[in-house]
Amino acid sequence: MTATRRIVLRAAAKLNLGLEIIGRRPDGYHDLLTIFQAVEPEDTLTIALAPAGEDRFTVSDSRFDGPDNLAWRALAMLRTRYNVGSGIGIEARLDKMIPAAAGMGGASSDAASALLACRELLDLPASDDELAALGGTLGSDVPFFFRGGTALAAGTGDVLTPLPSPRCWFVIVSPFIEIGRKTATLYAALRPEDFSDGSAVREQAMRIGQGNPLDPTLLVNAFSRPLLSLRADLSGIRDEIIRAGGVPALSGAGPTHYAVFEDREEAYKVAARVRERIGSSAAVFVSAPLPPRDVVGQEGASTDRPH
């Protein structure tokens, strides 16, 4: 990038440590209860001031370049909301590492980082609550990514209660498949038996709050049945996780699955077994819970999270 003043932010992925759909709202949305957990991999957003009238946005993966990218839409919304004139140009680059449309929140995380970085770069009078509200119009899980870490989420996913980070390791398996209009399709496929009262997620949140290990039997997900009815081949991913020694759970609306381990060495061994058995049909990696976001860094360095 050619501009001199810049901000670099990492945008974490997330897992859902259980996801229960409570019911359908009068506005057509759904009330849910879930636990968001920030994890690696992370995208990297670099944003800088540019010559007047020369907004530029590039993505390392050309499939996600253009005005429909959620991070670019976030920047455009912020420019309009706070009357940032054409005399100020913005140059942004997004380097993608989070699997796309995988149930790991990559687009929403990118949007949250874009709003935070642009506020800092342009010194905008936007409070955290205002940014979260703006982000929520782009996606219900965008507000979570302003802080990250671990949080119990209610409502449409926007009512957040911070939790301490659990001590564990995740083996994450993200299949290389595409599902057209995935979220809308899976919500439309929900049946009455897929709805629940949120008790499993609440119990898991209580365990986390008390410092107890995650209970794999509580990692229920309302989208498991509709997803497998749409893509029966994903049952093979679940089977391989089981054969390797893990208990599979689904993140978001999928297709990413994961398993939880208390021991780091065991997690890496299981990941190696899964990788060996499924070959190149999925990305397999190990991640630990990431702590909450801290501070926005400037001049090409990010201090938002220690590594």
Image: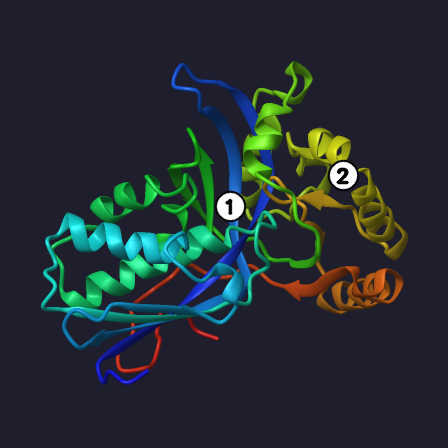
Provide the secondary structure element on which disc 2 rests.
loop
Residue 34 against residue 15 in the figure, above or below: above
Nearer-the-camera pick, 215 or 96 = 96
Q: What residue type is labelled 1?
A: Phe
Disc 1 target residue = 36
Coloration mode? rainbow
Mark 1 → mark 2, Cα distance in angstroms: 24 Å
Quarter location, residue 228 = top right
In x, y percent, where is residue 93? 38, 72
Mark 2: give few (<14), some (14-19) or many (20+) Cα within 10 Å: few
In x, y percent, where is residue 83? 10, 53
Q: What residue type is labelled 2?
A: Arg
In x, y percent, where is residue 210? 54, 44
| Residue appearing at x 36%, y 46% in the figure | 143
| Residue appearing at x 36%, y 55% in the figure | 67
Disc 2 target residue = 231
Q: From the viewer's perspective, is the residue at label 1 or at label 2 nearer?
A: 2
Quarter location, residue 52 = bottom left
| Residue appearing at x 86%, y 52% in the figure | 240
Question: Is 196 displayed left or right of 37 in the figure?
Answer: right
What is the tally of numbered marks visible in this picture? 2
Question: Is 29 displayed left or right of 113 in the figure?
Answer: right
Quadrant of the drawing holding the N terminus = bottom left
Nearer-the-camera pick, 125 or 281 = 281
Does any portion of residue 147 appear in the rendered image? no
Question: Is 284 displayed left or right of 290 in the figure?
Answer: right
| Residue appearing at x 58%, y 35% in the figure | 19
Quarter location, residue 28 = top left
In x, y percent, where is residue 159? 37, 35
